[in-house]
Amino acid sequence: MKQVKRNGFILGCIISIVWMVSCTQDAEPKPDSVVTITADKNSIKANNKDKAFFSVTVGGNDITSSVVITEKNNNIPLEGSSFSTDSVASYTFFATYNNIKSNEISIEVVDIDVIISVDRQAIKANNKEVATFSVIADDEDVTADATIIQVESLEAIASDSGFYTIIPGNYTFYAIYKEKKSNEIQINALSVAVSFSVDRESIKANNWDKSIFTVKFDDENVTSSAVMMQRMNDDTFKTLDNNEFLTDKADTYTFFATYEGIQSNEVNVEATWVDLTFLRGYSIVQISSTACPVCPLLTIELDKLKLSFPDRIHVITLHPSGKYCDSDLSGALAETAVRFVDKVNPTDMKNFAPPLAIVDLYDPVHLYTRDTQTPLKKALDRATLTRERVSMTGMAVQSTVNGSKIDFDVSFKTMKTDTYRFFAFIVEDNVVNRQAIGNQTADPYFINNNVGTYFLTDGDPYMGVNLGIISVGSEMTRSFSIDTDNFKPGRIVNLANCRIVCYTLRSTNGRDYFVDNVTNCPVDGSVRYLYER
């Protein structure tokens, strides 16, 4: 009986195990079941973000996590159950389960849309108005990463700077993002006028009265950056040095301006004739000495006089040599200084003591008091009385430096037909040298101005170079040159601080010559004809 019970228990266990195995086998796919792969979309964008998600089933059961999904073309298994790429192509996939291959499905990867736009389609061609770009790829702003190309020049434009120009015209642009080209857009740069105006359309032809020009670009004053031109009679152009015009020739003059290659309108200025009188200049030869304690008084007063009468007073300071002065200042003109002294003070130089001022070569003024202005002005009045009431000559000077030579062209005009002569000195300003001041002190850094340094060796200071006859209404131009190598001034001369003091001479008796007029010109510079206002 016990044996029967034991056999029944064992049989029950066997039946239970068989039933459990049978149930388990019914839950798993059968080896010959169909494996099916599907995707949630059959098209994605090539942006490495858009994805296709796969599902794999067998007999209606999802086995996605248990299968291997492979891209057929490259035979590369996917990591997971999704797919994305930035390469445009058609991709084929299948799944494998228990060595059973699924169906195949295709995913089309399409190009992304790169779209360029601009905030304004028209700007002023003024180098200020800016058109700003935006680049969108697959609904994302990629402007900062895109390259914007201007078609006409094929130049890349920084996307953060936008587009601006000063040249009118139509411009075409497109964008490149991840090697994808966008649509094209156009921007029209509208022409902006350069306006040219003058404050006075009529001036007097006296070399003082003047017109002032103004140049505007899109209502902005660009006068300082513009180029102003005068149209000449032979259809050539002359560039103005600044925005002012003055002349001594009566005529109608035409002008225009250019800015950034854009030409303005034209304006006319009429210069009307007036009776002209040349501005009278006076020469004052100062005889000075570094050992003279009162000479600085004259130097200071002459500087004041020049400030009071600009363009009229022209000082030439000469220093005799020997005990009277340091050789640094006397230099090659020491003998010339002695000659001036002898001319107005024909006594032994031993009896001479500076300071001395000689107005227009002949009128000496000895100065030993602080009241130096009074005798100087009286001497200037006397110089006026000894000549005709006005100067007969005017001078315009153009100077250049060529190596050791100071070359200068002088043009002469006259109000009286006569025989004229000419002479010139080179003077230097801001020459620092020891100078006695008072009885017991000396200033080692005294500043000397108008220091006579070179002169025209072709002639004599009192006789000058013969210009011949100059007729009324004509103009004569002569070229002169001073070779600085022919002089030994005893110091280093700074030509940037030098001026050419020029004077004309004429005679009333055929023997003695007096100064008719004086002017000065910077070395390597120029001066116009000067007229009385």
Image (cartoon, grey):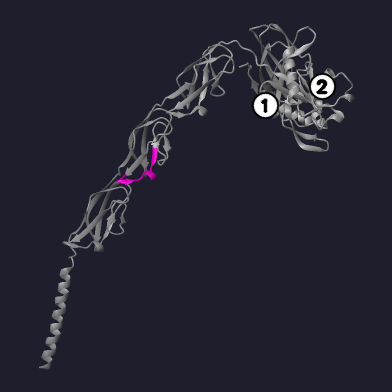
* Residue at 43%, 28% in the rendered image: 219
Q: Quadrant of the C terminus?
A: top right
* Rendered view: 23 above or below 207: below
Dot 2 corresponds to which residue?
A: 336
On the picture, is 528 further left or further right than 160?
A: right
Classify mark 2: helix, strand or loop.
helix
Q: Which range is magenta?
A: 137-148
Q: Decide: few, some or many residues near mark 2? Use Cα within 10 Å; few <14, some 14-19, many ≥20.
A: some
Residue at point 35%, 45% (across, down)? 142
Closest to the observer, 532 or 102: 532
The residue that disc 1 covers is 307
- Residue at 50 percent across and 22 percent down: it is 213
| Lateral position of residue 475 relative to residue 286, left or right | left
Q: Position of residue 424 (x, y in %)?
A: 74, 19
Give the Cα separation between the discs numbered 2 and 1.
27 Å
Q: Of the residues shown, which amino acid type is indicated by label 2?
A: Thr
Residue situated in front as seen by the camera: 136 or 520: 520
Q: Is residue 142 magenta?
A: yes
Total residue callouts: 2
Residue 476 in the image, given as x and y percentages of width and height: 67, 11
In x, y percent, where is residue 44?
Answer: 26, 49
Element type at mark 1 = helix
Q: Residues within 10 Å of mark 1 (few under 14, many from 20)?
A: few
Q: Which residue in the rendered view is the most extreme toward the bottom?
A: 1
Q: Amino acid at mark 1?
A: Leu
